[in-house]
Amino acid sequence: MEDNKDIIFEVFSNPDRITEALTQGVREALVKHKQAGNPVVIWRDGKPVWLAPEEILA
């Protein structure tokens, strides 16, 4: 159990590692949506906007 705490502390103490993991996860989700032909919602000019699959840059 103590080993898990050490690993969790190590991961969460590195903001660059967290940012990279989140970026990779979003990239993979966008690719999957595009491949499946599903739209996604993004935030543009203070408003939510639907992007058609062909508009997704992934």
Image: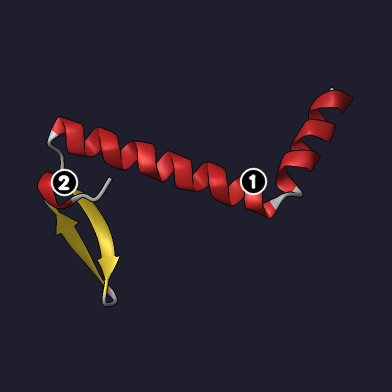
Q: Residue lying farthest bottom?
A: 45
Please identify the quadrant where the N terminus is shown.
Answer: top right
Residue 53: numbered disc: none
x, y percent for residue 20: 55, 46
**What scheme was used to colour the molecule?**
secondary structure
Residue 17: numbered disc: 1
Q: Is residue 26 left or right of residue 19?
A: left
Pointer 1 with pointer 2, Cβ within 8 A: no
- Disc 1 is placed on an element classified as helix
Mark 2: amino acid: Pro
Please tell me which residue is depicted at 67% across the width and 53% down the height of the picture: 15
x, y percent for residue 29: 33, 38
Q: Is residue 5 above or below residue 18?
A: above
Within 10 angstroms of label 2, few (less than 14), some, or many (20 or more) residues?
Answer: some
Please tell me which residue is depicted at 11% across the width and 47% down the height of the picture: 54
Please tell me which residue is depicted at 40% across the width and 44% down the height of the picture: 26
Q: Is residue 44 left or right of residue 24?
A: left
According to the picture, the residue beneath numbered tag 2 turns out to be: 39
Please tell me which residue is depicted at 23% across the width and 55% down the height of the picture: 41
x, y percent for residue 51: 16, 55
x, y percent for residue 43: 29, 65
Q: Is residue 42 above or below residue 22?
A: below
Q: Residue lying farthest front?
A: 58
